[in-house]
Amino acid sequence: MKYDFKNYIDKTNTGSFKWNLMRLKGKNIEKGIIPFSVADMEFKIAPQIIKSLKDTLDKPHLGYTKPDEKYFKSIIKWFKKRHEFQIKKEWILISPGIVIALFSAVRAYTKKGDGVIIMTPVYPPFYNSISMNERKIIENKLIFKNNRYEIDFKDLEEKAKDKNNKMLILCSPHNPVGRVWSKEELIKIGKICLQNGIVVVSDEIHCDLIMKDYKHTVFSSISKEFADISVTCTAPSKSFNIAGLQASNLIIKNKKLREKFSNELKKQGLTGLNSFAYIATKTAYNKCEDWLNDAIEIIGKNEKKVHRFFKKYIPQISACKLEGTYLMWINLRNLNLSEEEIENILINKAQIFANKGLMFGKNGEGFIRLNIACPTRDLKKALRRLKTALENII
């Protein structure tokens, strides 16, 4: 491979949230241990992005910056090529992060007391964006069947028909269960929401991270009618490991929805991004597709290793098939251990720092989310540590 995916950078004392969390939770952490929790990568950033940022520092300008034409063109070109999604410049709004966008969307499209539907288990800020804005969390629980999650369409339709429920936050691809929703599934979702006046805010931040043999479909690209009721949340942050630059782009075709969203951002004083965010986004979309494709190949290989390892050495543990994202949803329920026992084994014995399933909702109990965007040898070391930690228990 052209790029280095074999070596990670030790982020101790760099302010890394993920690494700081590991140090906070663990004691006497051995040298060479890396965390498997927060959704950023343990891969080196594409050298083209690093160079573009260095080149920017060579210029005597770090004042206020606005997106230029090249910025918008890079987004439009990327989504047309990668996802067959035709975007117009005027549809694009910018936000310093998808989480901020979710909070803004809840305020823009609902009132206090309104219900917002989410498909659980799901990314924790989905819950927070609703409850902290004094809206009601309406759970459409995913169905766990044959080690795979499916949408409960009957339940979704019932909840969409409730006039108190105004919005659906869709996670596509889904974090943490790793599903890439098929076009047929998305059409079912869209029809239900269209018939019942539900606004769809589709978080598609992982849309570029799709495993072999799967295809991501942008929800709003399916039809004019779906585009008219939806907001598409996108960012280069997960795809290119630049989350710290906080660059996100919202695609909103419907002018009324776009104006409501824009006004909500303005109310918060959010009118732009930092200078580096614009530069990194343009570079990522224009020059780093090869890096992304190589990263996806490594993630795919890592996923296969996880499945093979559990099947051979710890058959009591299973993992959902990873269709998209780089976050594996690991089922530990057959170990018949409590959440406290699992956490003790993972952190204190195996020194594996992953995310507890309960973070993603009550129906995440007995699972962990394992970030496998890391060098393969470090993943293999972690799996061997887990096997050793469980030898006298199972």
Image (tube, rainbow, N blue to C red):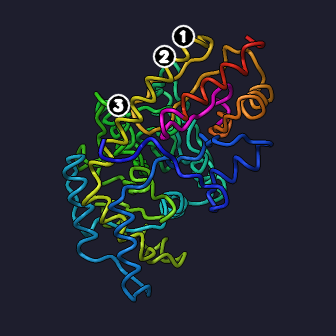
**Residue 223 highlighted magenta (yes or no):** no
In the picture, the disc for residue 312 is 1
* Residue at mark 1 to residue at mark 3: CA–CA distance: 34 Å
Quadrant in which residue 186 is drawn? top left
Q: What residue would you read off at disc 3?
A: 185
Quadrant in which residue 299 is drawn? top left
The three-letter amino acid code for the residue at tag 2 is Arg
Q: Earlier in the sequence, mark 2 or mark 3?
A: 3
Q: Earlier in the sequence, mark 1 or mark 3?
A: 3
The three-letter amino acid code for the residue at tag 3 is Glu
**Residue at 63% from the left image edge and 12% from the top image edge:** 316
Give the left or right position of residue 385, taking residue 310 as reference.
right
Q: Position of residue 124 (x, y in %)?
A: 61, 46
**Residue at 63% from the left image edge and 31% from the top image edge:** 368
Q: What residue would you read off at disc 2?
A: 308
Within 10 Å of the Cα at label 1, are there few (<14), some (14-19), or many (20+) other Cα atoms? few
Q: Are marks 1 and 2 in contact (CB under 8 Å)?
A: yes
- The quadrant of the rendering that contains the N terminus is top left
**Residue at 37% from the left image edge and 61% from the top image edge:** 250
**Residue at 79% from the left image edge and 42% from the top image edge:** 28
Secondary structure of the residue carrying tag 2 is helix
In the picture, the disc for residue 107 is none
Within 10 Å of the Cα at label 2, are there few (<14), some (14-19), or many (20+) other Cα atoms? some
Q: Position of residue 390 (x, y in %)?
A: 72, 17
Q: Position of residue 106 (x, y in %)?
A: 53, 58
Q: What segment carries the magenta color?
A: 361-377
Res. 202 in view: no
The three-letter amino acid code for the residue at tag 1 is Lys
276, 336: nearer the viewer: 276
